Image (cartoon, rainbow, N blue to C red):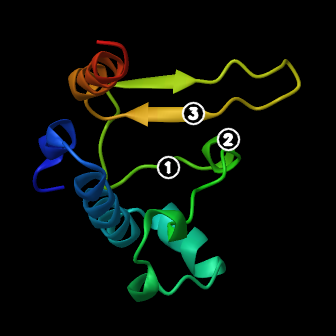
Amino acid sequence: MKHINTIFDIRSDQEFNALALEIFNWQHQNNAVYRRFCDLLQTDVSRINTLKQIPFLPIEFFKTHDVVTGEFEPETIFLSSGTTAQTPSRHLVKDLELYRESYTKGFERMYG
């Protein structure tokens, strides 16, 4: 994404919704797993105009696919705890510092 750090500058619901739609379109264009999922749902991307219309990828996909946008060597991989008989979900993280910034700023925004 061109301006990934803009996610940290959101100040209103309108800004959040606009950026969510922009990210949805970018993910649809650049994430093969997500695009195939949307295609299976017969999602008409041009008709997605609200946050509620964006298809959310089921967690099961993170157990069976590497859900990544573009090609990269992950800096780290987080695994879900799961039970012994379950396959854990995998979250491949490209930039651990951006990941830390995301959860830190999210926590600060919610709790001060």
Q: In this view, does 63 lie above or below 22?
A: above
Question: Secondary structure beneath disc 1?
Answer: loop
Q: Are marks 3 and 2 in contact (CB under 8 Å)?
A: yes
Tell me the CA gap for discs 2 and 1.
9 Å
Query: For residue 31, what is the image quadrant?
Result: bottom left
**Can you tell which mark lies on residue 90?**
3
Mark 1 surroundings: few (<14), some (14-19) or many (≥20) residues within 10 A: some
Q: Name the residue under label 1.
A: 67
How far across and how far down the image is residue 22, in percent? Answer: 27, 65
Amino acid under label 3? Arg
| Tag 2 secondary structure | helix
Q: Do the residues labelled 1 and 3 touch (CB within 8 Å)?
A: no
Which residue corresponds to the image point at 14% horizontal and 39% vertical from the top-left? 9
In depth, the one of 94 and 14 nearer the eye is 14
Q: Mark 2 points at which residue?
A: 63
Q: N-terminal of the two: label 1 or label 3?
A: 1
Name the N-terminal-most of marks 3 and 2. 2
